[in-house]
Image (cartoon, grey):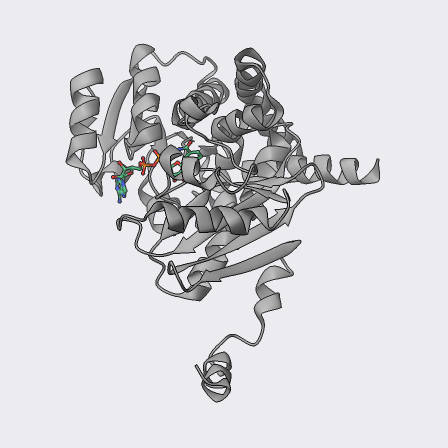
Amino acid sequence: MSASQVMKSAEKLPSNLFAMVEPMEHEQVMFFNDPETGLKGIIGVHNTVLGPSLGGCRIWNYESETDALWDVLRLSRGMTFKSSISGINLGGGKAVILANSKAKRDEKYWRRFGQFVDSLNGKYITAEDVGTSTEVMSYVMQETKHVTGKPESAGGTGDPSPFTAYGVFLGLKASIKQAFGSDSLAGKKVSVQGVGHVGYYLVKHLTNEGAKVFVADINQQNLDAVVRDFGATVVGTHEIYDIDTDVYAPCALGATVNTDTISTLKCAVIAGAANNQLADETIHGNLLKDKGILYAPDFLINAGGVINCYREVHNLSEQEANALIEGIYERTLGIFARASAENISTQEAAIKIAVERINSSKAN
Ligand code: NAD
């Protein structure tokens, strides 16, 4: 491309890129591009006060480059809060790759990604996320040691989803206790949206404790598995917002808690695995509070996976990691107490606690 062509495309860029980065307080954003393999993406390093930034690498067919930038910025910020509130010494980071997540990519592609991660000298540690896997990480680790979620055969802890699901289950139980006075799930009705890696294990925990579980998914195979293995009841993908349940557990997509769905949801509690469940954390956090629906902040209760990655980084024993995951129950109750004492939304209370830990660590 000639210099004048480059200038012409630069004119189309927003002139205020820093206006996206500054309010969210990112330390660093790296764009990477490898014409040979076609790899292109962005790494967001949000905050490294507590430790190196850690977060998964997502591959997604974004509608625009601005969408990709926005995604990496908000996801890496969420990782900062997630690690801080979980009491682990990691910061928040994330990588997004702009590509069709379904296409098969070769070893060279992923090794090149590993080289870009390595160029940050440990400021960012990668892991698997939507569209990536332990197999991908086995290629990445050939180029950098700053990688977690490695296959068990390579000394890693494998798929983080069962750990995430266990943490979500404990956060959900704490929410039930807050809302109903007892954390027993016997006879409670729970709707689970998305029964993939995390949703499957969540349904297992819920049905083991006697909950009646309703599930919705766009993937028939995944639905068949939870019906066959746990006797879950299938409902439609729109119906999931309308049915009369005690708990709605979003385990598929972000932003499903929004003005439309809040007006139809009949549950007392929202507690699930999906990241960024609130379409707008202030507006919808407050709307839920006003409507009397108890919301368990996603970054608080879905931290089991990152805690498991922390285990790899710091060579913790399985017992030590489990103890951190089990702490999600008490931490969730703590957030509810803080929200109620200050008459603020549970989302705001959780962010406050996460930021306070970072600030007090800065002061030391
Ligand atoms: P996954 O891709 O394995 O499962 C997602 C499921 O949601 C799939 O079965 C998919 O078919 C279904 N789905 C997609 N669109 C849907 C729709 N419109 N309605 C109903 N179902 C739909 O992902 P996962 O690893 O189980 O993660 C689930 C969520 O939890 C994601 O938002 C992810 O970011 C978040 N999360 C996962 C982990 C983890 O350890 N895997 C950790 C933290 C957060």
Question: Considering only vertical position in the picture, is 36 above or below 233?
Answer: below
241 on left or right of 308: left
Q: Where is residue 276 drawn, in percent x and y?
A: 46, 44
Q: Quadrant of the C terminus?
A: top right
Q: Residue at x 49, y 76 (%)?
A: 13
Percent across and percent down for residue 204 are 30, 17
Residue at (57%, 46%) from the top-left corner? 118
Location of residue 360 by image quarter: top right
Name the image quarter holding the N terminus.
bottom left
Viewer can see residue 255: no
Asked whether 292 or 65 is in front, the reply is 65
**Which residue occupies the extreme right position in the image?**
364
* Of 91 and 22, the residue lying toward us: 91
Residue 88 percent location from the top left of the image: 64, 28
User: Which residue is rendered at x = 21% and y = 41% of the image?
Assistant: 237
Query: Can you see residue 155?
Result: yes
User: Which percent across, then down, holds residue 116?
Assistant: 53, 52
Q: Quadrant of residue 187?
A: top left
In the picture, measured across the screen, residue 216 lies left or right of residue 341, that is left
